[in-house]
Image (spheres, rainbow, N blue to C red):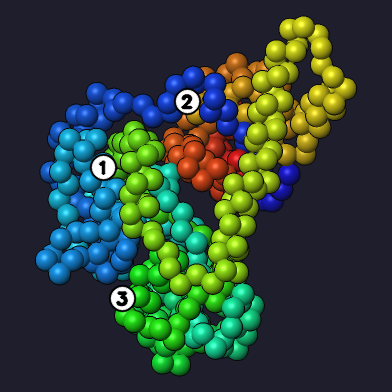
Amino acid sequence: MQMASNGKCIFFTLVAFFVFALTGTSLATPLTDAEKRWLEEHGDEIVLNFDRNFPPIEFVSKDGEYLGMAADIVALLEKQLGLPLRKRANDWPRILQQLEEGAPVISAAVTRTEKRAKFVYFTGPYVEIPMVIVTKREFGENKTLEDFGQKKVAVVNDFAAEEALRKKYEGIFEIVEVKGFKDGLRKVAFGEADGMVISLAAASYYIEDEALTNLHVAGNMGGSFSLCLGVSKNYPVLFSILSKTLDNIPPEELQAVTAKWLGFKYLPPKVENTLHVLKLALLFGLFAVGLAFLNGFWLKKKLRERTGQLSQTEQKVEALVENAPVGIFSSTPDGRYLHINQKMADIFGYSSSEEMMECVRDIHTDIYVDSHDRLEMVEELKHAGSVADRELEVKHADGGNALDISFHA
């Protein structure tokens, strides 16, 4: 457990495990009557803001048509909603600005960052795309960002990659801000920058489209970025509508869209192998393993408790969870606790885990200061498989000061 004084609040760490299998049905739920009324009353006010120059994700064709992977996702959303959205081409900085200003706009291709999370609600991601490093061919292969000490690395201004680079590599190499992918790749091609951090999708598209034959993918940035739908936090009902609608799209339709637009090229064998490793790491991270193990443990435990057949190993695991120095709980997506350890009850001000489970009937409203934080996390967990180090504000049992928690799932 991490504890640090924070004025009126105290900072804790919680580890959560969600049990999706218990519902027995699809996690997607139909729109409520209130959400349908909201859509009828405000549907004409909503504008889909899209980046005019972000191929193959979203862009404007020569004929002025909205195209790209995100455009096809939007078409599936419109089909589910039975409502065509007004669309407006914009530059990316302006799209972010309007979200921050609280305008009634949707971004169909936005990545969650710590800075943006202050003013944007994000649905679960519909695709993850690796971030790679593009260099001249003579720079070699199998490179990492640590190989760029005292060199120049280009990145598109206001994109998620820029925030990530500045957080980790500021001062290690010179970060060169560029207006767009084409501008950055040309700087690399003509020796004005040593490399560029860019999505694999954009790298593949522009290297071919611009005939930049002296460039190649030299290595991985060491992660990927997730594309989500995003709306201003001024519109929680719209966020709920989009989350549910995205969940209702059949998986095979989403897969067909991504396969259509993400045909990666110019991948050396070492990079291809690394991408496979990256996917495995994302799927089988620490918390995903913990999720599967503890969820299975608690489900089996409930069955075995009825027959009195708890093994020594299960007893040891139970003791480990109950005596952990961090709050640990398991819950269903609809907001019911299945298990709470004693530290969790202590953090929230309850005398026992039994009392907390009895008092908390709906996690969304009884625990979270902003119930949409819970919805947003469940969406991310369903699509990404894990949530790491998310800072949230929750309610204490005494109804007094709120608590700041660091949440992992």
Viewer-nearest residue: 154 or 388: 154
Q: Which residue is mark 2?
A: 334
Q: Which residue matches tag 3?
A: 209
x, y (%) of residue 185? 40, 81
Circle 3: residue type: Asp
Q: Which mark is residue 76?
A: 1
Type of amino acid under label 2: Asp
* Image quadrant containing the N terminus: top right
Determine which quarter of the picture holds residue 397.
Answer: top right
* Earlier-in-chain disc, 3 versus 2: 3
Q: Is residue 369 visible?
A: no
Question: Which numbered mark, 2 or 1, is in the foreground of this view?
Answer: 1
Q: Is residue 1 above or below residue 170?
A: above
Marks 3/1: CA–CA distance: 27 Å
Q: How many marks?
A: 3
| Mark 2 to mark 1 CA distance (whole Å) | 25 Å
Indicate the secondary structure of the residue bearing disc 3: helix
**Nearer to us: label 3 or label 1:** 3
